Structure formats: C-alpha cells, structure tokens
Amino acid sequence: MSKPFIVAKTTEISHADWLNARRKGVGGSDAAAVCGLSRYSSALDVWLQKTGRKPATPDNEAMQWGRLLEPIVRAEFSHRTSLTVKECPYILQSRENPFMIANVDGIVVEKDGTKCVLEIKTTNSFTTAKDTEDGLPVEWFCQVQHYMAVTGLPKAYVVVLIGGNKLQWQIVERDEETIQTIVALERHFWNEYVLKDVPPPVDANSGDALVLLYPTSTESSVVLPAEADELVAQYLEIKKAEDELKTAKATCENQLKALLKDAESGIAPNGYTVSWKSYSQSRLDSTKLKAAHADIATQFTTTVTGRKFSVSASKASKKK
C-alpha cells in the first residue's frame, strides 16, 4: 500500500479550514457511524456534516481538555514505554481510496523500526465488556482500523487517560477483513449518498439528524408509500410489547417494594441488592409562581419547539 497524501498541515491552517478539510472525506471518527455500528451517531448525521447541512459542533469542555492533554499523554506514554512517539500534524488522504481521510494523534516507532498509529483518548471510564470489540469500544476499534487503512500501518496503540490519573494502553492489530468491510461501506456511503446528495437510510440513532433535516412541519398531509403499512404494523406491535413489558416491570417493582416494607434495602438469595430509599427534593411550583408573580414567571419562560410523533388509526379504519 502506498503512502497517503498530505492534504494539509494542521498547525498551518485555521480551525475553520480544518473543519472544512474534514468535510472532504470520511474520517476515523465517522467510521463506526457510517458502518452502522456507533451507539451515538448515524450515517445520516455524518451525511449532514459532509454535505454542509449541519454546522460544526463547538468543542465542549471535555473535548477542550482532551486537546490540551494530548501532548502530555503522548509524552508520558513515550516515557513509560521507551518508544519513540512522533507528532503527526497532518490531515492524510488515502491514495487508493481518496474518500478516506485521517487525522491521527501521532506515530509510534517500535524498537525494530515498525511504525504504528497512535490514538489518544481521555475518558472517565472504560465502557463495559458488552460494548467493546477487541477490548475497546466499537467506535474506537473502527476508528483505528480506518486509520490503518489510510496509513497502511500494521498496528495501532490506543492510549487512554482515565479520570485524569490513570494511563493505560492497548495494541490493536491490523485486521484486513475488518478493513475491507469498512472501506466498502465507506465507499458506498460516499459515492451513493454524499456525492449524489441523497440522504442514507435512517436507523435508531438518526432522531436528532432527522430533526435537523426536517425541523418544522407544514400544514399538509401526504400519501405514504406502501412500505409504510409494514412499518406502522411493526411500530404498533413493538409499542404493545413495550407497554406490556412496562406493566410487568412495574408489577415486579411493586412486589419487591411490598417485600421490603419499611426497610431501605434487602438482599435476595441470588446476591442482588434491592433498595427503596427515602429522599427529598426541592422543586419549583410553576403554577404557584405564575399565580403570585406572573411577570417574573414570564421573564424566565422559554418556548420549546419540536415535532411530536404519533401513529393512530384513521376514522375509516376504526369503523372496520
């Protein structure tokens, strides 16, 4: 595999230019969403970003601290492992698959001269085992496999600073089968949706993206395609099952409360602890505030807009 192109040097461009460059291809942080594996984002969300329909999200405080701590983590990792770690202040682009770009946190040089991807994370804690792939959150695993696809490097070091006081790392080997799948899915996403300016199919994580794409409704009604019948049937069946599960859950909860009586907690024979603790909470009574001080209430009242989703039977179908 040939070396990637250098699109830009990040230290020589503005943040706005950096964000614009990221729109020119699928990045490592986009990989899991494009592949339908992210727990937090969707292909539609990535599509909105790449087509300029979604403004760049400003860094929150956690992201700002992550950027500030990155050189410190890089230096400490190098110190603890005695490995050479180099900065990589470039946006890279795959020669074989130009729709793939990468902005890696560094390059690790092993004792035998082997170069590897460095990915740095700062987090509060690791996710549970059921959310991981190869011992990593699936989003991180897809990200480093994407980076290895772009760079051609054989492995990656994922270095994590946990809670600001615990540093650990893991080596992720290049997985050709996974890379081939990621490349194929990203190619399809880029060619069929981004270049053609057609939104990709939605999934469970597409709610926020749909609100951004269609923020307000018009006073109109449309005839939905035939597939809507099956979707409505599935939705109603799932909703019924959900309601039944909620009822069953509430019944179990109340039966356990009845067993606890006045006790704050109890231990079941299987070792689980069941608790029903007292608490107090102060809440603002908006009704009384409006009645006593309507002018003050108005000053601190905000209007929230949105769209409410529902499925209901038509009058004609109800008569059947």
Image: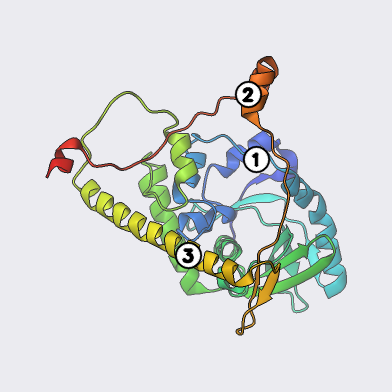
Q: Which mark is residue 105?
A: none
- Compared to residue 15, the image places residue 130 above or below, namely below
Q: Do the residues bearing badges 1 and 2 touch, measured as CB atoms within 8 Å?
A: no
Please name the amino acid that badge 3 sits on.
Answer: Thr
Mark 1 lies on residue: 18
Point out the tag, 1 or 2, that comes first from the N-terminus: 1
- Compared to residue 212, the image places residue 246 above or below, namely below
Query: Which secondary structure lies at badge 3?
Result: helix
Please name the amino acid that badge 2 sits on.
Answer: Thr
Image location (x, y in percent) of residue 159: 74, 66
Query: Which secondary structure lies at badge 1?
Result: helix
> Looking at the rendering, which quadrant does residue 84 occupy?
bottom right
**Image point (71%, 57%), residue name:** 278
Query: Which secondary structure lies at badge 2?
Result: loop
Point out the tag, 2 or 3, that comes first from the N-terminus: 3
Give the foreground label among 2 and 3.
Answer: 3
- The 10 Å Cα crowd at callout 1, few under 14, some 14 to 19, many 20 or more, is some
- Compared to residue 214, the image places residue 240 above or below, namely below
